[in-house]
Amino acid sequence: MGRALLVIDIQNDYFPGGVLPLHAADAVEERIVAAIERARLAGDRIVLIRHVSQARTGLFAAGGSGSSLRPAILAAAGEAPVVIKRVADAFQDTDLARHLQGVSEVLICGMMTQNCVVFTAMSQAAAAFDVTVLGDLCAAPSEVVHLIALNALGSKLRVANAVDVWPVD
């Protein structure tokens, strides 16, 4: 069975100048771009997740530039599908499961460690997969919030770093 990398919400609103800039977002984005390249070389499936709000203003407002996925992520991911979600759990009310057919292992990275990453990793739908959260490829509003979320996740499922999955020569 295959493996997939879910890249959650690498969107403009989480970066400097956005509605809710996260701690170390730029550095995390750089690491995710490198991980996408290593994942593609390993034959892993890539699925991008994009949160779109139904609100006209604010975080991820539909039609606003803040809800757009970052250009570097789109370029690295190539023709990867983009799943649109409206809540924290990327499985809830989306077609994500369809994109994961034939996959047994799901690697999760992205923005809002304590929210979208946690809710997707702990989703009832995720129980069908061997789930690993890649902690060095996630960001939160602060480093403390990020570390607390990873610690809590570690009591329920595997938390690793990208190098544990795709060793660098």
Image (tube, rainbow, N blue to C red):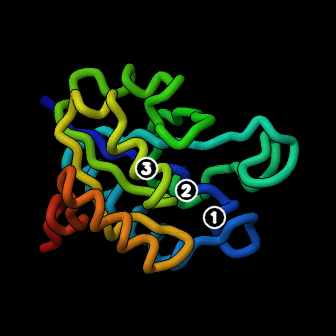
The residue where tag 1 is placed is: 14
Q: Residue 113, how many percent across, how many down?
A: 44, 60
Q: Which secondary structure, mark 2? A: loop
Look at 21% across and 33% down and name the residue there. 129
Residue closer to the observer: 31 or 52: 52
Question: Is residue 154 visible from the viewing direction of this image?
Answer: yes
- How many angstroms separate mark 3 from mark 2 (CA)? 7 Å
Q: Mark 3: give few (<14), some (14-19) or many (20+) Cα within 10 Å.
A: many
Q: Residue 93, how many percent across, how many down?
A: 53, 23
Kind of residue sitting beneath label 2: Ile
The residue where tag 3 is placed is: 7
Q: Is the C-beta separation of discs 2 and 1 under 8 Å? A: yes
Q: Residue 154, how many percent across, how many down?
A: 22, 60
Which one is earlier in the sequence, the residue at label 3 or at label 1?
3
Residue closer to the observer: 150 or 102: 150
Direction right: furthest residue: 56
Q: Which secondary structure, mark 1? A: helix
Q: Quadrant of the N terminus?
A: top left
Look at 32% across and 65% down and name the residue there. 150
Q: Mark 1: give few (<14), some (14-19) or many (20+) Cα within 10 Å.
A: many
Q: Quadrant of the C terminus?
A: bottom left
- How many angstroms separate mark 2 from mark 1 (CA)? 7 Å
Kind of residue sitting beneath label 1: Tyr
Where is 43 relative to 127, above or below? Answer: below
The residue where tag 2 is placed is: 10
Q: Residue 144, how many percent across, how many down?
A: 43, 79
Q: Is the C-beta separation of discs 3 and 2 under 8 Å? A: yes
Look at 53% across and 72% down and name the residue there. 25
**Residue 6 placement, left or right of 139:** left
Residue closer to the observer: 122 or 97: 122
